[in-house]
Image (cartoon, rainbow, N blue to C red):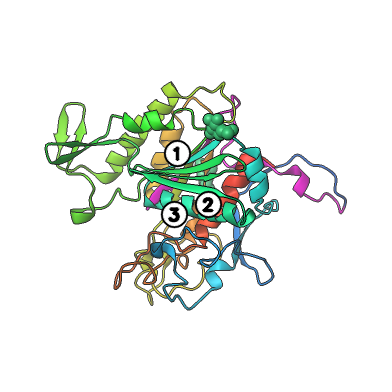
Amino acid sequence: MAFTVIMFLVGTATTAGLLRLGHYLNHMGGHKKLEVECDIFHGRWEYDHADPHPLYSPRTCPFIPNQFDCQSNGRPDQDYIKYRWKPYSCTLPPFNGKRLLQRFEGKRIMFVGDSVGYNQWLSLVCMLHSAVPKARYLLETKGGLSTLTFQAHNVSVMFSRNDFLVDIVDDKNERILKLDSIGNGGQLWKDVDVLVFNTWNEGLQTGKKQSWDVIEEGNARHKDIDRLAAFEKALTTWAKWVNSNVDPKKTNILFQFQGVSPDHTNSRDWADTNAKNCKRQTRPVAGHNYPGGRHRGEAILDKVLGTISKSVRLLNVTALSQLRKDGHPSSYGSSKGAVDCTHWCLPGVPDTWNELLSATLLRY
Ligand SMILES: *[C@@H]1O[C@H](CO)[C@@H](O)[C@H](O)[C@H]1NC(C)=O
Ligand SMILES: *[C@@H]1O[C@H](CO)[C@@H](O)[C@H](O)[C@H]1NC(C)=O
């Protein structure tokens, strides 16, 4: 599970998830310009034979790691890349990578988060690369920071690995997760033009996969605490950071916090007694109601976002991703024998998140 939200820091409050897509609506057969607010996250998945998607493939995009390269790892079905997201009340503008690069010329776009954020960053760099396949680019990786710069446009698309948004500090062979502190990361985020946050994916990891040893909050130390409670605390620390460090007058700064990226490790969530997990799933859940209901983290997210005084926009991809039990690497990820029902194949579902992000950023 992971979280990603959008926050527009442009001085005016915007309703979460609503976009002005007026010029894309037909009115009474004519093309009258109608300024109608459209919730682009409310819609359905549609199988599309004719669509030119995907925008890239493992052959054309040099950045897809083995972990997400389901096709090269032998995934036999391809329907999962042919489903398009269709909002009910407007048409999503087609992704226009050139336009995005022009709009953000000389700017930096940074994803901050866990491995699902990495998944989304890779998707966006592939989408942009496919828009300007001959353009020179520079890829730099330093510590937990990866930067891909499209040199002609001087646009940098960055990924900063930070699983919980708050600090993890190495101290005498002990990794301390500090729920009430944002230090190092905060320096890195300042002055970035577009910030896209996500977290939570690693929140439920235990044993060897857990990336910390001790939880600290003020003077209190815990070997472990309820993970949802920890998530709420970390997110609250992050919200305070936003409240006191972000300058709403500096337009063009835009925060996004992705909604919860669901996993599909238990087929009971979509009321399927024949399956066990996401393995061999080749189509989305039908309709638009997920039998498993709302993700537990979403209510926390709504609550914490409500405490942020800057205007906030949520990339509300939880519900639409819940339907995509077919989008995961399952046994076509990197480790043999493992079934990955948490991350997403590329090309695949994260491309839709980025289409929605782009539509939001460009404010069609
Ligand atoms: C996110 O989308 C779901 C499904 O359309 C909706 O129920 C929920 O209220 C949305 N959340 C926000 C904060 O807009
Ligand atoms: C490229 O953009 C960065 C900000 O992202 C800026 O500091 C730098 O001066 C720009 N370089 C050129 C050559 O315009």
Q: Is residue 159 above or below residue 94?
A: above
From the image, state whether disc 2 or disc 1 is nearer to you.
Answer: 2
Which is nearer the N-term, disc 1 or disc 3?
A: 3
Region rendered in magenta? 1-29
Spatial CA distance of label 3 from label 2 is: 10 Å
Question: Foreground: 231 or 170?
Answer: 170
Count of numbered badges drawn on the protein? 3
Q: Position of residue 128 (x, y in %)?
A: 58, 52
- Circle 3: element type: helix
The three-letter amino acid code for the residue at tag 2 is Val
Residue wearing tag 1: 302
Circle 1 packing at 10 Å, graded few (<14), some (14-19), many (20+), is: few
Q: Is residue 84 above or below residue 258?
A: below
Q: Residue at x 21, y 26 (%)?
A: 218
Q: Is mark 1 within 8 Å of ligand 1?
A: yes
The three-letter amino acid code for the residue at tag 1 is Asp
| Residue 115 appears in the picture as rendered | yes
